[in-house]
Image (cartoon, rainbow, N blue to C red):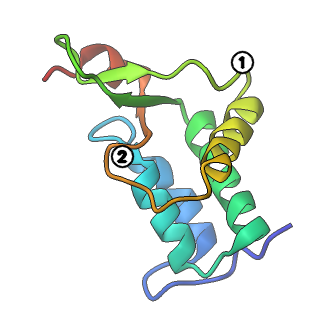
Amino acid sequence: MIDLSRSHSRYSARQYLQWLPNEIDGDGESWFRIANAAQHLGYEREELQEFLRLCMLRLLDSGAVPVLFAAEGPLTWVEQINYGSTNEERAAAIVAEWVAKGSPRPEWDDLWFVTRRVLETSRR
């Protein structure tokens, strides 16, 4: 169990988790912003991974789907279906993928999270 009372100058980890899904039915939420927020909260190593897993679960349980920007076609996003079939599996797989890459600094075009409605209607 990690300490969710940790805080950054503007928010605590608990508040961040609460607010996290606010953008998924609009512009979306990005791995870039999530990983940076977790690091600003002071999480490292196993605690960082656990906080990121909790963030993924919060998004997925709120109706988000993992997506990448579409390289072609009329829609903005392409759903990433390679992470498992349950939200627990997906959350663990997303974090494990990042760790397997050496936990690199996230890039803006890494994984994003949007609702299915946004996935199916957002056009370039």
Please state which amino acid type lies under the numbered disc 1: Ser
Q: Which residue of the protein is positioned furthest toward the bottom in this rendering?
A: 9
Residue under pointer 1: 85
Q: Quadrant of residue 24?
A: top left
Give how far across and how far down residue 90 sits, in percent: 68, 32
- In space, the residues marked 2 and 1 are separated at their CA atoms by 23 Å
Task: Tell me the element at label 1.
Answer: loop
The first of marks 2 and 1 along the sequence is 2
From this view, report whether residue 120 is shown above or below residue 111. above
Kindly identify which numbered label has been placed on residue 32.
none
Q: Which residue is at a point 59% across and 35% down the rendered structure image? A: 60
Depth check: give the residue in front, 44 or 10: 44
Q: Is residue 83 left or right of residue 35?
A: right
Q: Are marks 2 and 1 in contact (CB under 8 Å)?
A: no
Q: Quadrant of the C terminus?
A: top left
Q: Quadrant of residue 61?
A: top right
Q: Which residue is at a point 48% across and 69% down the rendered structure image? A: 37
Q: Which residue is at a point 69% across and 53% down the rendered structure image? A: 54
Task: Tell me the element at label 2.
Answer: helix
Depth check: give the residue in front, 19 or 84: 84
Q: Quadrant of the N terminus?
A: bottom right
Please state which amino acid type lies under the numbered disc 2: Glu
Residue under pointer 2: 23
Q: Is residue 85 left or right of residue 36?
A: right
